[in-house]
Amino acid sequence: MASHFVTSADIPADGERLHNATASKVKMIAGGVCALLTLVSLVLLFVAPESVRAPFAYSWLFAFFFFFTLTIGGIFWTLLHNVSNSGWGTAVRRVMENLGSIYPFMFLFAIPLLCPAVQQYLYEWMTTHREGLSQENVGLFDGALLGFYGSDSLKHWFEEHHHALLYNKAWYMNLFAWYVRVVFYFVAMTLVIRGLRKLSVAQDTDPNPGTKRLFQARFHSTYTFILFAITITFAAFDLLMGLDFKWFSTMWGVYLFAGSALNSMAVIIITVTLLQHAGYMKKVVTPEHFHIKGKLLLAFTIFWAYIAFSQFFLIWYANITEETSYFLIRNTGGWNTANIFLVFGHFVVPFVILLQAWLKKSPKLLSLMAVYTLVMHVVDHYLIVIPERSVSLMNILPEQFGHVTTAVPGAFWGDLLAFAAIGSGFVFFFLRALGSNNLYPNRDPRLLESANVSN
């Protein structure tokens, strides 16, 4: 429970804005680092020798999707708060919204993934489709028509090149449809988070805020939750599962969602802790809020583990070649050790620690666990993307990478570079969002209820 009952007199009438010299300095440094490293990354993606470009394409995808999950996770928590009409979360809702507001800027980092020069190393099926289209002298848009994929000559071409399975998936895995879906992912969720954040921020200066905007936010969060589910699921299919078009898992979208929700909550916990350390939000956020966020962290740790095990168990039991390939690659060489480490590190350790109620009420200790969880999320996404690199490049560029077994020598430094480039951009846009408006909805009618929450 809060140390004392909070009244409206305890909360600044105009709210609190992030005016902090350290935050401004970090934002400036992050922006500069992002600009510099992104420029270097573009050179490595488009100008460097093919022996560098090909491995670095996987580095960029790994880093991009990791931060993509954090930003779309911010949208998830905003939607969930609004739909559930949560009282406790009012004090930290703006942090959720600010985290989600980074999402539109992630499209800037996705642009290289839209370029054939990068796609040729990541998505074998795209190269195959482009070859097929050129055989028929058909354009990209015309090639999206199902009638084109019913052409006897193209069907014969696919079968002749041993791509009958890809031909059967062409109704979904065709270039035009892929581009349309990717644009939809960013446009739909951008409109959602911008609209909800606009409603929230407008309340801060409304002389008669009332509950109208709360009902509007709740209404608009209901049907847009469907758009969120579509986005996180099919983005996971198109950008990650598409690395091997033969592989599939019906639980893949839920698996990525579980990690997204878990680790975006970790970012929210760390952010609120740092803000309180800087002297902000002390009147509206109490140990009770951290206790609730800690319980959510524990809940999604369990949920992630449940989905991960279920996915593995179903694939192991069915023993279908197209499904088992994913785990066979990641059980080869050192990747097997990393997988065992992930099982214990991503579930067993945080599960045991987060069971302690007293720890969840300590902002510093809970934040340490949140940092640890994010590190495990990095390992998780590294294992999703990077093991595919050596296998794919051996097939795509056998002359250069035919000698590679489980890892491309020296490519790890590119992984670090891509992670630092997109990560610094994430920090820049997040601090920019935090400083643009009040840190919490100071005129929300439920703020006092939230400030005095007890659980």
Image (cartoon, grey):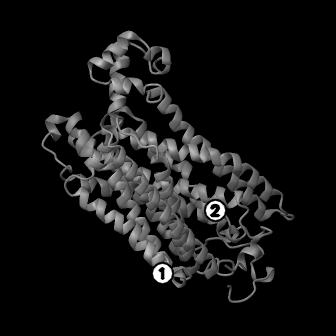
Quarter where residue 320 is shown: top left
> In the visual, does 101 lie left or right of 154?
right
Instruction: Give coordinates of residue 355: x percent, y percent.
Output: 50, 77
Closest to the camera, between mark 1 and mark 2, is: 1
Q: Determine the secondary structure under disc 1.
A: helix
Neighbor class of circle 1 (other Cα within 10 Å; few <14, some 14-19, many 20+) is few
Q: Nearer the viewer, residue 52 or 352?
A: 352
Q: Nearer the viewer, residue 238 or 203?
A: 238
Residue linked to disc 1: 365
* Residue at image location 30% in from the left, 38% down from the top: 321
- Residues under labels 1 and 2: Cα distance? 29 Å
Quarter where residue 431 is shown: bottom right
* Residue at image location 69% in from the left, 45% down from the top: 223
Q: Nearer the viewer, residue 312 or 427?
A: 312
Q: Can residue 127 be seen at all in this image of the molecule?
A: yes
Q: Amino acid at mark 1?
A: Leu
Residue linked to disc 2: 436
Instruction: Give coordinates of residue 278: x percent, y percent.
Output: 56, 79
Q: Amino acid at mark 2?
A: Ser
Q: Residue furthest right?
A: 208
Which numbered disc flags the more N-terminal residue, 1 or 2? 1
Q: Residue furthest front?
A: 317
* Residue at image location 71% in from the left, 54% down from the top: 198
Quadrant of the rendering where the N terminus is positioned = bottom right
